[in-house]
Amino acid sequence: MDAQTVSDQIEKVSNARTPYLDGKIFSMTLILAYRLGLKRQEIIDLNIGDIMKGRGTILKTITINDAKIDLSDDLQSIIHNHIKYLRIMEYNLKKEAPLIPMRSKKRYHSRQMGYDSRKIYAECSVTPQMEKFRQAGICHYYEKLIKEGDSPSKALERASHFARRTQRQTLGIITGTMYKENKLQRHRPTDAW
């Protein structure tokens, strides 16, 4: 999945509105999965206080499972706009409040997020699931490192740190063979990979 496809799919989700789901809030899950390589549970566990310091200052580095992740300036701007939208929609913005709340203003549970993601993807005709966005983000990050001049082994090492996976698992994601819960699963990579 190339960057333009990812952008188009996120835009579709962002424009979706249902009585139970706000696409503008839910599209942030896809942005975080693609841009930061976050897994579903890592996105669910993110709090406002993990991202924002004080009154509206977005942190340049966040910590996820003891891994430090740098936020680019444009991603900081996207997150800032997301938090402004939450403020306008009168969501809780305390430090312990979820960054991606449900419409009921509570924290998602993994099963509920999976259910809601299937509903919103069907609503706006988005075919890839969140894990595919994450994989595309990991591949994009690896390709960016290669273009910047890293050797393939160094790029793989940095990409595995970015993905918070072993090098073997990261190589599987990049080459189109995923390792999930200790089971080898084959999938067909898209032409963009």
Image (cartoon, grey):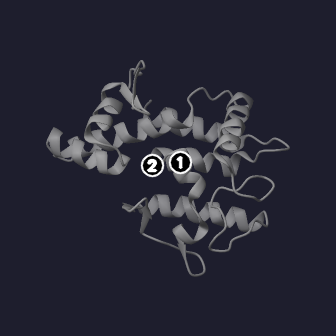
Q: Residue furthest right?
A: 19
- Depth order, front residue of 120/94: 94
Q: What residue sits right under mark 1 in the picture?
A: 31
Q: Is residue 175 above or below residue 25?
A: above
- Depth order, front residue of 124/159: 159
Q: What residue sits right under mark 2 in the picture?
A: 35
Q: Residue at x 69, y 71 (%)?
A: 93
> Disc 1 marks which amino acid?
Ile
**Looking at the figure, which quarter contains the N terminus?**
top left
User: On the picture, is 123 further left or further right than 135?
Assistant: right
Name which quarter of the figure residue 72 lies in: bottom left
Q: Position of residue 185 (x, y in %)?
A: 41, 22
- Depth order, front residue of 108/100: 108
Secondary structure type for disc 2: helix
Q: Residue at x 29, y 42 (%)?
A: 166
Name which quarter of the figure residue 152 lies in: top left
Report the Cα–Cα distance between label 2 and label 1. Answer: 6 Å
Q: Position of residue 104 (x, y in %)?
A: 81, 55
- Decide: marks 2, 1 in contact (CB < 8 A)? yes
> Disc 2 marks which amino acid?
Arg
Q: Position of residue 51 (x, y in %)?
A: 52, 67
Secondary structure type for disc 1: helix
